[in-house]
Image: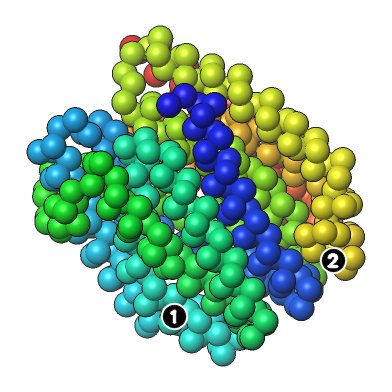
Amino acid sequence: MNIVRASVYSGIATAAKLVAALVVVKLVASFAGPVGVGRLGQFVSLVSLLAILAGGGISAGIVKYVAEYRHDQERLSRLLAAALWYAFCASSLMACVALAFSQPLATWLLGDPGYASLVRVLAVALLGIALVNYILAVINGFLDVRRLAFVQVSGSLLGIVLVVWLSQWLQLYGALLALVAGQVILLLVALPAWWRSDYFRRDMLRMRFDGEMTRRLALFSVMTLSSALLPPLVNIAVRDHLAAQYGWEQVGYWQAVTRVSDAYLLFLTTAINIYYLPKLAATGERGALMTELRNGFRYLMPAVVVLALGVYMARDLVTRILFSNDFTAANALYGPQLAGDVVKIASFILSYMMLAKAMTRLFVVSECVFAGTYLVLVYLFTARFGLVGAMYAFAVNYLMYLVFNAVVVRRYLGSL
């Protein structure tokens, strides 16, 4: 499986996820306007945050070590038993925390304690979400990109049906509820698809504590949690800052542009995650690593440039189709955001070297530092340029991150 074929399969899966995400945004924009889209962004950040915590943040570790151990049945069995035990403990803990703090979370993020019941539903769903994350990571670790794409496409289609039905019934509450239910309903597809694979064994569903494997997974847990938890937390802080300065309507414009950005970049970030992590993890020779990195830049950078230019040229049409005429003011925000997207993909291609080679300390420190610099830049640039300053902050921060990763990769390759 090369990067082109992996990109095709991941692109199909991403297109389905993209359509599902845009259906949610369109529905919310139609009956709740910019304020509703801003609230949707807050809840999506909460779901992302708790979904990652529910699995213990070990999905990347499962992918890496399954790719390494897939020909060593004894070590593979130990790894997966430890991973399932780790995920079960983490999801149970997070479910209890979410249940205990459901009302404060609803008040803080959604501005209405009446949404506490929604947070409680999310808490109960965390066990199922953790199992879904585990299954998808195992499939990805075996480089079974076709099966992974099938699961994700089928799950997205089921999610679309669910969100249309629930939003018509309960409007904003229903759309948010569908986001949670859609995470769990993926089990209806993932489990049967996994069972039919030629690498599935029943002992992959057994839980057992294993000290050595748990320590290995814990290192990835630290890296994954830092990279996955910090962005939602920082984005929540950014929304709160923008809301305080400009109001929730302006937050809705910012959220609309960032949602478009996240949507089309899914095609590329998913390909990087599905292909590069297991590939780099299983590769130790300097020449082979350099070849993989060159291929990444050769195929992915032209793609992101073309996509970004396409979105920019069609920004008015994109905004009207995906949202409504109420979001016209968001068109002025696309330029710096899309420029930042190009730099972001370049930095991601390089940053996966730290994940694949378990550079835990350096990775965690870099994630913390650049999350902090982004927040600082948002405060500085919005004070100087207004709302568009948040987009300038995004682009400048990723430019600094790209330079940092280029130095890290050059030093690592030089040491081989």
Q: Is residue 133 left or right of residue 28?
A: left
Give me the residue at 13% from left, 45% from top: 78
Between 165 and 87, which is closer to the camera in this rendering?
Answer: 165
Give me the residue at 64% from left, 86% from top: 169
Against 213, is 242 above or below? below
Instruction: Please tell me in which quadrant of the rendered image residue 326 appears.
Output: bottom right
Give how far across and how far down residue 317 sits, in percent: 87, 52
What is the three-letter code of the residue carrying label 1?
Answer: Val
Give how far across and how far down residue 364 sits, in percent: 41, 42
Q: Which residue position holds label 1?
A: 121
Against 236, is 166 above or below? below
Give me the residue at 14% from left, 44% from top: 77
What is the three-letter code of the residue carrying label 2?
Answer: Ser
Q: Which residue position holds label 2?
A: 324
Total marks placed: 2
Q: Is residue 212 left or right of residue 313?
A: left
Secondary structure beneath dot 1 equals helix
Against 96, is 12 above or below? above
Q: Which mark is residue 219?
A: none
- N-terminal label among 2 and 1: 1
Give me the residue at 68% from left, 64% from top: 23
